[in-house]
């Protein structure tokens, strides 16, 4: 699978870190775009973002990368975390940076675009922007953890969101908590 992973300036760098750690870069082509504000937030939240070997890193404003063109075949893009400012720009169709242009290309080409907003609470403008990107074809996957798996650490809580992102991408995640089919009982935690 050919993926573009992007991060913007909302809090939640740990979601990006855990997603990057759980994608097999030997089996998938992964390109990473981090906005300037995302770099600042990452420095505050995780000190140093660890980018796995095999992930191609690109500047936020490099429009010479292949994924900014609809003629280049990529499978999916994830923006994690996605600030409400970025979501608003997506809703308006702005393509002023490579990150925004890429998201716009994924929408126009009907490719999977997953946005993971972490900000809360929302105002009415945020809600309308979410509706706009949903209507345009994006998957909006708010960073809302689940607790069925009885997480024991912050990483366990974060992973409940990352597992949902991986599910949306169609990528394997054998550690993911799955609900049993029979009787509604939770599956054993692996």
Image (cartoon, rainbow, N blue to C red):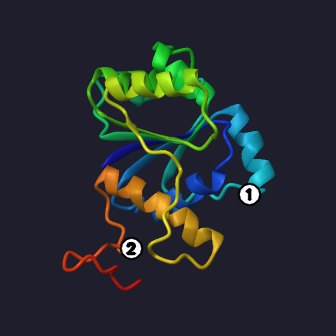
Query: Are discs 1 and 2 less than 8 Å apart at CB?
Result: no
Q: Tell me how many marks there are.
A: 2
In the rendered image, the vertical position of residue 54 relative to residue 41, given as above or below: below
Q: Is residue 88 left or right of residue 107?
A: right
Q: Which residue is mark 1?
A: 46
Q: Quadrant of residue 66?
A: top left
- Give 149 or 172, whichever is nearer the viewer: 149
In this orientation, which residue lies closer to the viewer: 52 or 8? Answer: 8
Mark 1 or mark 2: whose residue is earlier in sequence: 1
Residue at 42% in and 62% down: 163
Give x and y (percent) for residue 142.
Answer: 50, 45
Tell me the quadrant of the picture where the C terminus can be found. bottom left
- Of tags 1 and 2, which is closer to the observer? 2
Horizontally, residue 119 falls left or right of residue 42, namely: left
Residue 30 horizontal/vertical position (percent)? 43, 48
Q: Can see residue 60?
A: no
Q: Residue at x 51, y 78 (%)?
A: 150
Q: Quadrant of residue 9?
A: top right
* SS category of the residue bearing label 1: loop
Q: Nearer the viewer, residue 157 or 185?
A: 185
Q: Position of residue 4 (x, y in %)?
A: 44, 40
Identify the residue at the far front of this view.
Answer: 183
Q: Secondary structure at mark 2?
A: loop
The answer to whether 37 is drawn above or below residue 50 in the figure is above
Residue found 49% across the figure and 23% down from its top? 129
Q: CA distance from mark 1 to mark 2?
A: 25 Å
Residue 187 in view of the camera: yes
Residue corresponding to mark 2: 177
| Residue at position x 37%, y 22% in the image | 105
Q: Residues within 10 Å of mark 2 (few under 14, many from 20)?
A: many
Crowd around label 1: few <14 · some 14–19 · many ≥20 (10 Å): few
Residue 60 screen position, x and y as percent: 60, 29
């Amino acid at each position: 699978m050919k993926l573009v992973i992007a991060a913007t300036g909302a809090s939640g760098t740990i979601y990006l870190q855990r997603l990057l750690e759980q994608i097999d870069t030997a089996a998938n082509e992964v390109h990473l775009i981090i906005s300037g504000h995302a770099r600042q937030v990452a420095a505050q939240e995780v000190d140093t973002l660890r980018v796995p070997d095999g992930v191609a890193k690109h500047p936020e404003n490099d429009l010479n990368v292949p994924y900014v063109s609809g003629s280049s075949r990529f499978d999916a893009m994830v923006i994690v975390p996605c600030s409400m400012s970025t979501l608003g720009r997506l809703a308006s169709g702005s393509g002023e940076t490579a990150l925004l242009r890429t998201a716009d290309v994924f929408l126009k080409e009907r490719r999977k675009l997953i946005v993971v907003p972490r900000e809360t609470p929302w105002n009415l403008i945020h809600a309308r922007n979410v509706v706009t990107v949903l209507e345009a074809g994006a998957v909006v996957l708010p960073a809302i953890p689940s607790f069925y798996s009885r997480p024991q650490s912050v990483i366990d809580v974060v992973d409940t969101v990352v597992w949902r992102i991986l599910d949306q991408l169609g990528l394997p995640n054998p550690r993911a908590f799955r609900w049993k089919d029979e009787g509604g009982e939770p599956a054993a935690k692996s």
